Image (spheres, helix red, strand yellow):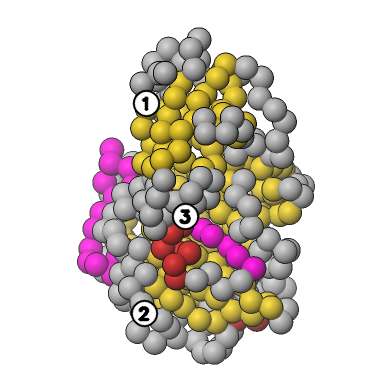
Amino acid sequence: MAAVLWAVLLTAAAQAETPVSAPLPPGVDPSGPWKLVRVRDGAEVPVQIDRSDAPRAVWIHRGAAGANEEYRLHPGKPSPFPAVEAADADGKHVVVSFRGRNIFRYTFAPVEPPSGVDPVFTRSGYLHPIWTPDGRVLSNDFPAKHLHHHGIWFAWTSAEFEGRKSDFWNSKERQGRIEAVKIEETFSGPVFGGFRARHRWLNLNSPGGPKPALEEVWEVRAYAVEGVFVFDLVSTQTCASEAPLRIRKYHYGGLGFRGSGEWEGKDGCAFRTSEGRGRQDGHATTARWCVMSGTLGGRPASIAFLGHPANFRFPQGMRIHPDEPFFNWCPAQGGDFSIEPGAPYVSRYRFVVSDAVLPDAAAEAFWKGYAAPSVTLSAPR
């Protein structure tokens, strides 16, 4: 099999180190083995084949921003490279790590709330802890003021199913519950590692008892990026019956993040958006990205939330809390909408976690690398 040649061009403002991918041309066997070589210096670059319905080669582009870079995919056994590893930690959690450092943990077994708290707050299917590269925990779970907040999670608030109110966000309302059903796959490799899991959204006030309203698949991937942690979450929600889920206009609901208890209080953390707004004026505005930062153990840390241009109502509205460490991508701020039978609702987000306060220019660069890296198939030479 002849080699495949790709050219990569990132805009001048794009991050020089970013995950990129390209579809395998017809006739290229995705089972490999394959190795990727950077043409200008002959250096081998870690590559991983995503063997989905449309197989793709995935690698980390580390060339100069704003310059063309060419890569050649050759048949042959690749060199060993450190892997992004996803492992079942204890029958209850999947932990994803790179170079021996934990990135995040996914909880698929039901987690009960603290002692003495109503068991209605029991939850599964979320990411916590989220670690920084030097090992500090950036997220929180079951915070006292909002027991329904869980690291990184997804829920709709003001929703209706078969004409009944179905609040999946506020557990105390006893209208909806989201539960992890199973881990469909874990995967590890030299470029990315992660998992695919299935969730079920149950309407709890159906006359006949709990009834599925939505089926959801999470695919979460962390990448072999140096210096910071970078991971993606893709949520695909489909109707579980012929009934749609109607989501009403509301100021929060969707993908949420709860920050560390050290970030509590109006001065505990800061926010910056791609539009130059902060904690005081960022709520209910739209943005491409938002950076949340604060001090953990006496040192700075931050997490950036990047929205993909393919998302519904991009750039999406945000819930930025005035005195708690809470961030939420909230398309429902833009008005009512429905998830209809036969029309999956797909949400795509990238997260960048740093041991420093991520500068605006870096956040914008990471977003451009996420949103529109240019990868083209070149003529063989």
- Residue located beneath label 3 in the image: 15
Q: Looking at the picture, which amino acid does disc 3 mark? A: Gln
Q: Give the Cα separation between the discs numbered 1 and 2.
A: 41 Å
Q: Name the residue under label 2.
A: 277
Identify the secondary structure beneath mark 3.
loop
Q: What mark, if any, has residue 378 been given in the picture? A: 1
Residue 176 appears in which quarter of the rendering?
Answer: bottom left
Separation of marks 3 and 1 at Cα, in angstroms: 23 Å
* Mark 3, other Cα within 10 Å: few <14 / some 14–19 / many ≥20: many
Image coordinates of residue 70 in percent, x first then y, are 46, 33
Residue type (three-letter) at the residue carrying disc 1: Ser
Q: Give the range drawn in magenta.
A: 331-355
Q: Residue furthest front?
A: 41
Magenta includes 217?
Answer: no
> How far across and down, in percent of the image, does residue 367 sit?
41, 57
* Coordinates of residue 331 in the picture (x, y in percent): 31, 63
Q: Which of 19 and 282 is in front in this view?
A: 19
Q: Is mark 3 in CB contact (under 8 Å) with mark 1?
A: no
Q: Judge by depth and name the residue closer to the eye, 357 or 283.
A: 357
Who's the residue at 33% across and 73% down the image? 275
Q: In this view, does 152 lie to the left or right of 77?
A: left
